[in-house]
Amino acid sequence: MKFLVLCLAVVVASAAAFVACPTSSRLVASNTCSRSASSLRMSDDDEDALTAAARAARKAGPNDRVVEIRKPLGLVLEENEKGDVFITKVKDNSNASRNPKVFPGDKISFISATFGDDLWSVRGAGLARVQNAVRVRQGDSVRLVLESTNESKSKIAAAAAEAKERKKYEEDAQVKRDRLLKALDEDTKKKSKKFFGLF
């Protein structure tokens, strides 16, 4: 029975990570989130932008700036109009101030899942979801993937180049398919003429 209650508590805590909590201001310290849950604060436009692929759990990549910070983090976070969360201040003598890879102005793009080493995208998720994800994270520390403005631009440029290359590959493949279909169609027409020529 105790095991069942413990499992239920973990599931409820995990679900709470993705429920918004009310804040009186957009500028809130990372350890000041009310435990009362309200409805989600995402508009239809935000929902469209946040695809299932962007929310999928993944491991950290070689180009990711991953930092691990003990709780409480000691970060002051702010949300922009798109729902992206930025570090506005690193508090003095805090756990975050001991990590040389954390800078004011960095955007939080991924955050630790409740359990394990997986990271979940928080792009456009909003401040409340980031705070809840930190709160329900099991263990003493949280892993974040941070991006500066320049890192974000270079990742966007790399993704655009990859998309352009993929589009060219698909266009070339379509041209080859069209050529083969045309040759097959011509061959079929020739064979049908020969067949009708017998009668």
Image (cartoon, rainbow, N blue to C red):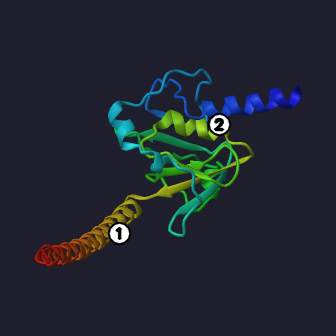
In the rendered image of this protein, does residue 193 appear above or below residue 104?
below
Figure quadrant of the C terminus? bottom left
Q: Earlier in the sequence, mark 2 or mark 1?
A: 2
What residue type is disc 1 on? Answer: Glu
Residue 178 in picture, x, y percent from top left: 21, 71
User: Could you tell me residue 27's position as x and y percent?
Assistant: 46, 34
- Image quarter of the N terminus: top right
| Side of 152 where 13 appears, left or right | right
Q: Nearest the camera: 43 or 95?
A: 43
Residue beneath the point at 69% across and 32% down: 11
In the visual, does 150 lie left or right of 66?
left
For the point 60% across and 20% down, the residue is: 36
Q: Quadrant location of residue 136?
A: top right
SS for dot 1: helix
Q: Residues within 10 Å of mark 1 (few under 14, many from 20)?
A: few
Q: Mark 1 sits on what residue?
A: 162
User: Could you say whether the residue bearing mark 2 is in a helix, strand or loop?
Assistant: helix
**Which percent across, then down, holds residue 12?**
68, 28
Report which residue position mark 2 lands on: 135
Binning the other alpha carbons within 10 Å of mark 2 as few (below 14), some (14 to 19) or many (20 upward) gives many
Q: CA distance from mark 2 to mark 1?
A: 36 Å
